[in-house]
Amino acid sequence: MRLRYDEETERFRAEAAAWLDANAPTAADMTERPRSSGHLPGWARRWQRAQFDAGWLVPGWPPELGGRNATPVQTMVYFEELARRLVVRSWNIQGPTIFAPSVVDHGTPEQRERWALPVLKGDRTACLGMSEPGAGSDLAGLSTRAELLDDHFVVNGQKVWTSGAHDADFCICFVRTDPHAPKHRGISVLLVDMDTPGIEARPLAALVDREHPDFNEVFFTDVVVPRENLLGGLHDGWRIANGSLAHERGMLWVWESARLDQSIDAVRARATADGIGRDPALRDAVATACVDSLALKCRGYRGFAKFARGHDAPEHLLLKLFGSEANQRLFLETAEALGLDALDTAASLRTGRDDADCPWILRYLGSFGLTIAGGTSEIQRNIVAERVLGLPRR
């Protein structure tokens, strides 16, 4: 079994690493904090555009879409280098990872030009109109209606947990266009300008950062959307939805792996500094996290090897669930070991990340967002049960 990349791939890695070291934003560059995942300050727009122009934003795509026709293995290597540095491609993460790929995969040339390219270049930002109050992460249970009238749709309904909606320019909105069809059918996808009359985004106060809310509830009241904004075919939304979320889940594990390794290093440093390293529960938690990290990598690379050969990779359905919950367990055990110090900002370890001064208890509370992104843990378990284990739906 060969557990290393070939020389050509390592040369590609060296090129990617050198470019990142020369161009990735530093703490000094980040002069303004993004208000939300739908807001890109000037430095963040410049960083994303630099990647696009140099072919590093989506390496596997052609140059006109921000890539360099890299192989899947080369693309994975680039993601490894990003994750190793804890550098994100875009602070509007849902734009290049879900919105733009969905438009590129299913849209017309005109839609690519109008909707995908501005988001890829960092000129515009996007949000995802998926979850609803009565359905949560169960997309098939959505009830937002879009009635087709001649050359336009009229949209009415509500979305929730819509990240960055109050700052985003565009929305990829999943709507029910045939209310009489079975649950997984009769769904369509519309590309919506967030400035359209009848759209109201209401930010939801965040538990861990009330000054920078990201989640929103979004209300659509008689919103008129041109028929030309229909993505894919009418009533074809379920197929597009599965592709959209696959784009997200297929990458999240790389970041989760890097995040877990960074968390382990932070806990070790904190335990050494405060003398709590002898706490049996914390020692056990760190050891478990180290094993989890190795398991996450092994399972991730095994799934990626299948994907690179053109085969289905059910492993990717497990990785996001496993990685997010492994981080959450480690944060909880560390907070419990620290006791009251877990509430103290000044006592928190500097890690060089945005949450460097974040109390450990808030890291734990914030980790629940990780178990929601890309589909809640509950939905992920249902998907694994049905698609991997072949269990019947109840």
Image: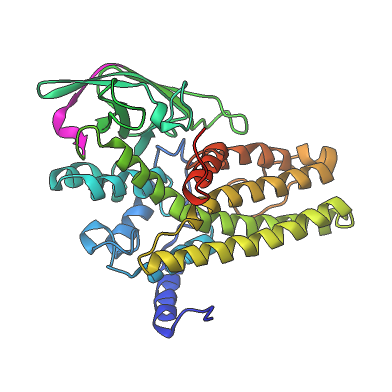
Picture quadrant where residue 273 is located: bottom right
**Magenta-colored segment: predominant secondary structure:** strand
- Vertical comparison of 174 with 26: above or below: above
Q: Over which residues does the magenta segment extend?
A: 221-231
User: Which residue: 30% across, 27% down?
Assistant: 175
Q: Horizontal placement of 210 versus 75: left or right?
A: right
- Vertical comparison of 22 with 253: above or below: below
Q: Nearer the viewer, residue 96 or 46?
A: 96
Rendered location of residue 70, percent (x, y): 32, 69
Q: Nearer the viewer, residue 394 or 217?
A: 394
> Which quadrant does the N terminus fall into?
bottom right
Rendered location of residue 61, percent (x, y): 28, 61
User: Total of numbered circles in the picture?
Assistant: 0
Task: Kindly give the residue lying farthest to the bottom in the view shown.
Answer: 7
Query: Is residue 20 shown to the viewer in this render?
Result: no
Q: Nearer the viewer, residue 297 or 28?
A: 297
User: Which residue: 44% across, 34% down?
Assistant: 163
Q: Is residue 225 magenta?
A: yes
Picture quadrant where residue 266 is located: bottom right
User: Which residue: 50% across, 51% down?
Assistant: 388
Q: Horizontal placement of 368 versus 304: left or right?
A: right
- Vertical comparison of 378 with 70: above or below: above
User: Which residue: 28% across, 17% down?
Assistant: 198
Rendered location of residue 311, percent (x, y): 38, 64
